[in-house]
Structure formats: structure tokens, C-alpha cells
């Protein structure tokens, strides 16, 4: 399995990281993609990938960390991407989040457009975050038809999912589907094509059912796998094969 979205530089993984990597591998998760959130953690995520061959990383400016981003950060990102090693597999985490306090939509949109332009320039996929802003995000993606990637933490309707799939994006399927009450998302995932899905935990966020209040762990990707297998009515082996191939193709992982 491939966990396509795991903040492995956050607690608790920043302590005894090698042990966490071993635990993750023992659970059958053989590769992690660690997106960054701001200039302040670009080097940390790069160091993880440099230390552990089972980790890849992405460089980006997350909308929730909007207060940390400065006018020249797009220029800094361009420079960092031009020097980044092969283990840098995407631009992200980037996107729009109009649910945060003081969202400053114009600033968010400017930063997103800048990052999509860099993804196009450096021929990299993007890892997208979106809350309360799908219409705006989809309109902006229309300006960059050559940019593809993953809509992280998909939790929308079937129609929302199709809007991204038709633009060539994959859907990041995470812990939301492990909750029986999440009917809208579960029904959407059941209806949408497995060929457009990848697995993710968003660890240490988005805990799976039964572990509320605890940090999420990449080893719990197995629980998301089981839930997706049940929803789609196909074997876990087929889920692993298809989602891993999707991740490999999108991020050029060659795992």
C-alpha cells in the first residue's frame, strides 16, 4: 500500500522516526508521501526523504498556514523546486480553504495560481486541499488544464468527485469512509471509479473510526483499505493493486 498523504514531520512521528517507519512498513504500507505546509518545513520534509528511501515529499504552501506565507514565497518555491531531488514528487499541499478564520480569499487564490503555474513549469502533479471552495478551485483549475494531481481528503458528493475526475485528477480516499454516518461520502466513493482513487491517512489528522481523539497513524491505512474494499465490492488485493498503480503513475514513484 501507498499512503499518498501523511504529515510524517508532525508529532508524534518527529520523535523516534525510524521506529515509526518500521511500524508503518510492518503494517504493509511500503511508501509514504509527505506534503509540506509552509517554507518553514520544506527542509524537514526533504530531510525525511533523504533519510528514508520509502518516503517521498512535496513542496508547497498550505492555505491553513496562510498567516505564515509571504509575497516572495512563490519565488522561493520556484527556486526550491528547481533544486529539488527526485524524491520531490509534487507541489503541495496547496489549495483553498474558506473555512478558516480570516480566509483572505484573494491572497489564497493568488498563492494557488502561483503554485499551479510552478507545477506546470516543473512538470509536477499537485496535492490539493479544499474546504468550502470547490467552485472556486475548479474554476481556477480550468486555467491550468495540463496540471493534474490528487484532490486530498475527498469528502464530497458524487458530482463533486466527477468534476475533479473529468479534469484528470485522482481522489484521495481517507478515514472519512470508515464512519458509517458519512453517507454522502461513502455513497459517492461507492459510485465513483476505483481507477481515479488513491489511499491516504492524512496522519496525524483525520482519525479513522474507533480511534477518535488519537493521532492518526499511517499503519491504519489497512482500515481505510478494508472500508473501501467493502464499499466497492472488490478484493483488498485489487484495491491495493489499482490504488498503488494510480499513485505510481501520478507521482512517478517507481515503487
Image: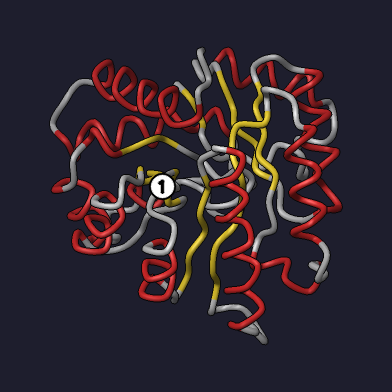
Q: Position of residue 169 (x, y in %)?
A: 35, 46
Q: Nearer the viewer, residue 172 or 226?
A: 172
Q: Nearer the viewer, residue 104 or 48?
A: 104
Q: Quadrant of the N terminus?
A: top left
The residue that mark 1 highlights is 146
Seen at 78% across and 44% down, the residue is 11
Question: Is 122 situated left or right of 147 in this image?
Answer: right
Seen at 60% across and 21% down, the residue is 24
Seen at 75% across and 35% down, the residue is 13
Q: Secondary structure at mark 1?
A: loop
Q: Position of residue 190 (x, y in %)?
A: 17, 46
Q: Nearer the viewer, residue 99 or 106?
A: 106
In the depicted structure, whether residue 53 falls above or below residue 113: above
Seen at 13% across and 31% down, the residue is 233
In the depicted structure, whether residue 25 falls above or below residue 6: above
**Colour mapping:** secondary structure
Question: Is 70 situated left or right of 215 in this image?
Answer: right
Amino acid at each position: 500500500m501507498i499512503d499518498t498523504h501523511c504529515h510524517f514531520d508532525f508529532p508524534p512521528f518527529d520523535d523516534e522516526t525510524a521506529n515509526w517507519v518500521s511500524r508503518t512498513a510492518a503494517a504493509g504500507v511500503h511508501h509514504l508521501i509527505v506534503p509540506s505546509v509552509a517554507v518553514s518545513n520544506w527542509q524537514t520534509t526533504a530531510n525525511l526523504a533523504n533519510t528514508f528511501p520509502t518516503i517521498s515529499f512535496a513542496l508547497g504552501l498550505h492555505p491553513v498556514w496562510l498567516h505564515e506565507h509571504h509575497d516572495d514565497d512563490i519565488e522561493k518555491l520556484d527556486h526550491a523546486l528547481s533544486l529539488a531531488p527526485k524524491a520531490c514528487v509534487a507541489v503541495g499541499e496547496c489549495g483553498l480553504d474558506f473555512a478558516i478564520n480570516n480566509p483572505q480569499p484573494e491572497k489564497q487564490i493568488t498563492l494557488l495560481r502561483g503554485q499551479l503555474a510552478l507545477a506546470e513549469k516543473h512538470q509536477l502533479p499537485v496535492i490539493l486541499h479544499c474546504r468550502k471552495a470547490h467552485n472556486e478551485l475548479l474554476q481556477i483549475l480550468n486555467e491550468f488544464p495540463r496540471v493534474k494531481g490528487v484532490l486530498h481528503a475527498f469528502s464530497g458528493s458524487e458530482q463533486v468527485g466527477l468534476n475533479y475526475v473529468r479534469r484528470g485528477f485522482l481522489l484521495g480516499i481517507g478515514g472519512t469512509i470508515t464512519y458509517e454516518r458519512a453517507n454522502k461520502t461513502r455513497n459517492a466513493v461507492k459510485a465513483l471509479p476505483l481507477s481515479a482513487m488513491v489511499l491516504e491517512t492524512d496522519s496525524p489528522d483525520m482519525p479513522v473510526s474507533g480511534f477518535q481523539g488519537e493521532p492518526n497513524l499511517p499503519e491504519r491505512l489497512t482500515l481505510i483499505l478494508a472500508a473501501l474494499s467493502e464499499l466497492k465490492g472488490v478484493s483488498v488485493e485489487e484495491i491495493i493493486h489499482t490504488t498503488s498503480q494510480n499513485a505510481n503513475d501520478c507521482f512517478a514513484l517507481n515503487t
